[in-house]
Amino acid sequence: MLYNVVEIQNILPHRYPFLLVDRITDLKEGEYIEGYKNVSISEPVFQGHFPDHPIYPGVMIIEGMAQAGGVLAFKSMDNATQEEIQNKVVYFMSIDKAKFRAPVTPGDQLVYKINVIKNKGAVWHLDAKGYVDGKVVAQAELKAMIVDK
């Protein structure tokens, strides 16, 4: 374990119920990150999606992958202090080639694997995949920018 949820909250501005990364398990600055979210039936999204047949929404999977990518981007900032990181936020610029391969349900551990396609200054282009039990359940290319709050 590299970062637990408390340490992730020191990096990202997201909070419950919208912090969608529970742990970061691997990270190589400027190259890739791996982390996960434990999907639980107690999450508020399952009250409406869907009460009789709970499926974790694809948009939440994409957001979770983006949050993991945000951790990667922040941790890849050269010599950035905690104060500098806390005064910045990551904004989506685009989501391309999104595909959903299989449903994610309560009890699944959703593993995020994010690789850098390109980084130029504050702009990050990422290849993001979500896995459950070693199988790809979602994928997308994400582009984001680190900006001042």
Image (cartoon, rainbow, N blue to C red):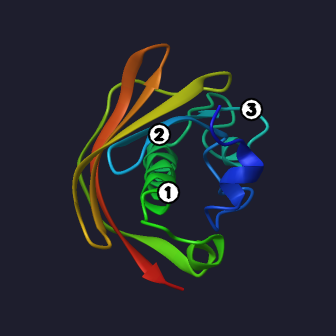
Residue 98 on image: x %, y %: 27, 45
Write the residue at 42% across / 57% down: 76
| Residue indicated by mark 2 | 27
Is the residue under label 3 in contact with that under label 1 (CB below 8 Å)?
no
Disc 1 is placed on an element classified as helix
Query: Which corner quadrant holds the C terminus?
Result: bottom right
| Residue indicated by mark 1 | 75
Q: Identity of the amino acid at label 1?
A: Lys
Write the residue at 43% across / 81% down: 147
Residue 34 on image: x %, y %: 47, 35
Q: Identity of the amino acid at label 2?
A: Leu
Disc 3 is placed on an element classified as loop
Q: Identity of the amino acid at label 3?
A: Ile
Is the residue under label 2 in contact with that under label 3 (CB below 8 Å)?
no
Badge 2 or badge 1: first in the primary sequence: 2
Give 58 or 115, whichever is nearer the viewer: 115
Is the residue under label 1 in contact with that under label 2 (CB below 8 Å)?
yes
Q: Kindly report the distance in space between the C-alpha atoms of the residues bearing marks 3 and 2.
A: 28 Å
Q: Nearer the viewer, mark 1 or mark 3?
A: 1
| Residue indicated by mark 3 | 41
Asked where in the image residue 135 lies, by quadrant, the reply is top left
Disc 2 is placed on an element classified as strand
Residue 18 on image: x %, y %: 65, 57
Q: Kindly report the distance in space between the C-alpha atoms of the residues bearing marks 2 and 1.
A: 9 Å
